[in-house]
Amino acid sequence: MTGDDSGKPLDEGVADLHMHTTASDGTLTVAERVALAEERSLSAIAITDHDTLSADLSEPVTTIGSVDVIAGVEVRADLFNTKIEILGYFLDPADEQLQELLAQAREFRTRRNTELVERLARVADLDITYESLADSVEGALGRPHLAEVLVENGRVDSIQEAFNEYLARDGEVYVPMERLDAPAVIETLHAAGGVTSLAHPGRIRADTKQVEQMVERLVELGIDGLEVWYPYGAVTAVDDLPITPDRALELAHRYDLIPTGGSDCHGPGSEKFRLGEVRVPVETVDALRARHAELAAERAEKP
């Protein structure tokens, strides 16, 4: 699906710009992502793992087979005391400041997950430790892995039930996580050549006015894009969102932001296996490339 000027989905898009691999909480490797993208006639994908750049990506963009693979990331950040997530595209994996920022974000996640596992072991009567679970998974341990443990041990019947009962914000063992400041995230991603976009504004826990104020503030901070096309309907009725895709597209036009989009696919077995179900047009990819070229030129000019 892509979007026309109404913000509604179409079917002829060429790229999926939001997905996760085994480097964070996805279930497929980069190579498996590429193979599936080729099967689904995608010419470009962005790997946007949580707080980490896949070790398989050494350049801002790499052509593998017939697919351009964009080095990206999804970083949790704080704005107005509210959690948001910022996507970065065409990043330089060798950038030291970027890697330091992501290491700090992962440390926040490790501390939160350690406490989460301790609570889950106690409440659900499970013989688990953070160390044993972390050693048993590929990539970074996350809540989807804990959901799988709950299903495997018969505490719930599905991944979704695991989140609803235990792991989601209103769940029995939920633990909040420290967040990086949004200005620092945008500045660091830009310094690493990365083009930035606010991820899924319709999922932000705020009302319409507050989310629109967040977008305005992010524009002041230099954000480049806004994720317009996203599979909200899989979880929440679109009409119930604080910001609908139509409204997000209006905001993108108002502030001259690049409208981005992606499936947020986590892979088979995750209940978020939807690679290519959201697609963006070639114009979006071209706009991101052009902005990356501007940022790269700015980097080259610095002493």
Image: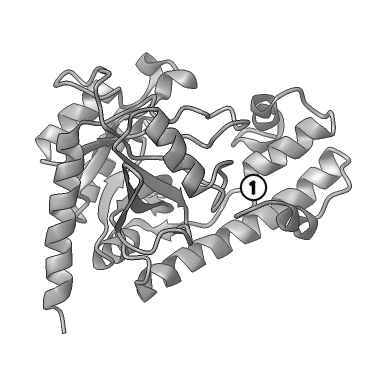
Residue 43, by quadrant, is: top left
* Coordinates of residue 4 in the picture (x, y in percent): 17, 21
Left or right: where 73 falls relative to 149? left
The mark tally for this picture is 1
Q: Residue at x 61, y 35 (%)?
A: 168
Vertical arrangement, residue 37 with respect to residue 245, above or below: below
Task: Name the residue nearer the viewer: 102 or 209.
Answer: 102
Task: Name the residue nearer the viewer: 285 or 190.
Answer: 285
Q: Residue at x 67, y 29 (%)?
A: 159
* Coordinates of residue 67 in the picture (x, y in percent): 32, 43
Task: Name the residue nearer the viewer: 238 or 231.
Answer: 231
Query: Badge 1 is on which residue?
Result: 175
Left or right: where 60 falls relative to 205? left
* Coordinates of residue 64 in the picture (x, y in percent): 36, 49
Q: Is residue 67 visible?
A: yes
* Coordinates of residue 161 in the picture (x, y in percent): 69, 25
Q: Residue at x 24, y 17 (%)?
A: 8
Left or right: where 290 falls relative to 182? left
Which quadrant holds the C terminus? bottom left
Vertical arrangement, residue 64 with respect to residue 153, above or below: below
Residue lying furthest front in this view? 65
Q: Residue at x 23, y 25 (%)?
A: 247
Q: Is residue 264 visible?
A: no
Left or right: where 76 falls relative to 118? left
As helix, strand or loop, the secondary structure at mark 1 comes to loop
Vertical arrangement, residue 238 with respect to residue 265, above or below: above
Which quadrant holds the N terminus? top left
Vertical arrangement, residue 297 with respect to residue 169, above or below: below
- The kind of residue on which mark 1 rests is Val
